[in-house]
Amino acid sequence: MSNTEMVEEKPAKVLLGEIVAKHYQEAWDAKNRGEKVGWCASNFPQEILETMDIKVVYPENQAAAISAKGGGQRMCETAENAGYSNDICAYARISLAYMDVKDAPELNMPQPDFVACCNNICNCMIKWYENIAKELDIPLILIDVPYNDEYEAGDDRVEYLKGQFDHAIKQLEDITGKKWDDKRFEKVMEISQRTGKAWLEATGYAKYTPSPFSGFDVFNHMAVAVCARGKEESAIAFEKLTKEFEENVKTGKSTFKGEEKYRIIFEGIACWPHLRHTFKQLKDGGVNVCGTVYADAFGYIYNNTYELMQAYCGTPNAISYERSLDMRLKLVEENNIDGMLVHINRSCKQWSGIMYEMEREFRERTGLPTATFDGDQADPRNFSDAQYDTRVQGLIEVMEANKAAKMKGEH
Amino acid sequence: MSDIFTLGIDIGSTSSKCVMLKNGKEIVGEGVVNLGAGTKGADQVIEQVIEQSGVKFEDIDVIVSTGYGRNSYEGAKKTMSELSCHAKGGTFIFGKVGTIIDIGGQDIKVLKLNPNGQLTNFLMNDKCAAGTGRFLEVMSGVLDVKLEELGELDKKSTEKTPISSTCTVFAESEVISCMAKKIPIPNIIRGIHASVATRVAGLAKRGGLSQPVAMTGGVTKNSGIVRALSEELDCEIKISPDSQMAGAIGAALYAYEEHQKN
Ligand code: SF4
């Protein structure tokens, strides 16, 4: 590739940043035009909204951004002062605070005319959205996805979901005056598929040793997978990202700076308020994150409407323990993993509660070392540098000793 | 060939421990100062050990630090986590063990070792002071007895008064109400020890307990805890007068390995 071409073509990272900015801008524009704009749960079937050309913004994405930029504590305290318990998910607290104060210098977004909730990630979400609906006196659209005790959602569940899709569409038509269009839906599904596949293909490049990218990068890129899965430009940007990774594999480059000595699974949501610290400790020890369940959660794969509904039943927090475990074991197998670092996230009980048993069985099945640390995805008060550092160092030392023992055995 | 002297310094949250090792085998000096990270504890304890061993500071070949304050000691060539150091030190003291339990000032560590004495995995408490050394400190404060006396007082108990709260603050009020009811102090202490033991055992049992089990750290001096934990785990627990020094011994051994590398 010539130098001029490189200058002309924007790197995927830039494209992805632009998509997120545009996503927020479009919501503001719609609001200013007098259109109805919603607040939407990250794993709500965006295909519905995209088909109807309804603009929504994602409180979870906003909360992550606010906390990554240092506003988490302020917003959590605002919610607590309004009477919300400190035990509630910090995303919820930040969002409820934002509903009240309507301003966050870290990232503002339009106020909602309706809220769209889907509990395939947790049930805390229902109360959070109900509260917003009640406080602001706006409609709540709820898609209820029961926890899947079976491996794959069967006909009965898909049927249950279908009824709700129909009802949600009807509600949205009434609220916004916009109409459903089957043809457009087909098109949207096609684009979403392209995006989902490209996203998973990109993160799948972690199977190479060394990995062509730093695992923490995907925590940033995933904003697009959350907010703009149904947009063609997202598909293009992820395909670009895939190409860049492919190129890195060929040239032996990586966005992970330094030598990749160890490859771990980072279990759970990122610790946004302490992202830099959590990353630096790993990086300084030569540890790259080569597997996350969190990022891949936003790559939905399906071939038809039935499978689409099944896919929305298959988010990491809605699936059975057995399937969850298999996801981790698959990462180990495919990505040449040396250990696992588990974020016991005070906010996300749904995700963390299962981890005690998951960690135990993971260790037993793989023989790999694991370490847990206490943290929070958005409330900075639930994390201790010293605790994190000791556990990460301990994990590195065990991985190091394992490697040394392996070398001895091999020679 | 001249002797090799390595120094391990374990700077904990409440005390600093130091060990001087000759040729990676023989302890020629050791000391404890009840001052932890952020204090003069480290310098003081090193001074003690130098005096005791007769080895001059300039003759020390390598120093490795460990513990909560490990990064604050500038004289160390490298740092190692308490986890690896307790595993190594524990193996030095006890020989082959499958599990090492250390109740530290702020955390509980359960270390799993393979037959070669290599640390293969570890489990630690989640954020909660219950079951840690700090919990015991708070309780001794409430009971107005010295921390070191807890073990002896436990021996005088006639029965165990259950202390069911795991939260340190709740347990504190539970203990106060027991005192108000005039329950004999030794019985309350036994209850406190049992409550710590339950918590630690819960962690230790997670993922199976490999025998033999040993305990390191300063809390081993409290015979009441050791007994309660042994009851709870239903097995013998190895302890040693050197248990408290395990972290520092491990660090000194790592320092020796570091020297051998070069
Ligand atoms: S972080 Fe967990 S608790 Fe919070 S909204 Fe997401 S799934 Fe629910």
Image (tube, grey):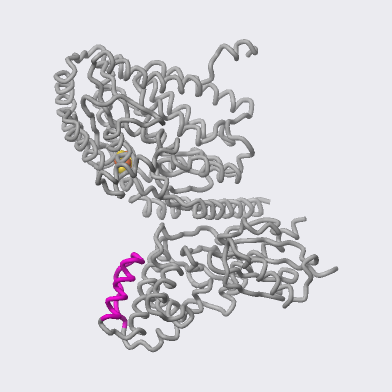
Image quarter (top left, top right, bottom left or bottom right) of the N terminus of chain A: top right
In depth, the one of A291 and A402 nearer the eye is A291
**Does B126 sit left or right of A9 as displayed?**
left
Residue A5 x, y percent position in the rendering: 60, 11
Say whether residue B175 is magenta: yes
Please state the extent of the stretch shown in magenta in the rendering: B160-180
Dominant SS type (magenta): helix
Quadrant of the rendered structure where residue A301 is?
Answer: top left
Classify B225 as above or below A251. Answer: below
Which residue is found at the position 34% from the left and 30% from the top?
A103
What residue appears at the point 41 percent right and 31 percent down from the top-left corner?
A106
User: Considering depth in this image, is B186 or A400 the residue closer to the camera?
Assistant: B186
Q: Position of residue A353 (x, y in %)?
A: 33, 51
Place of residue A82 in the rendered image (x, y in percent of width and height, measured from the top left): 26, 43
Q: Is residue B257 above or below residue B143?
A: above
Q: Quadrant of residue A310?
A: top left
The image quadrant of residue B24 is bottom right
In the rendered image, residue A6 lying in the magenta stretch gets the answer no
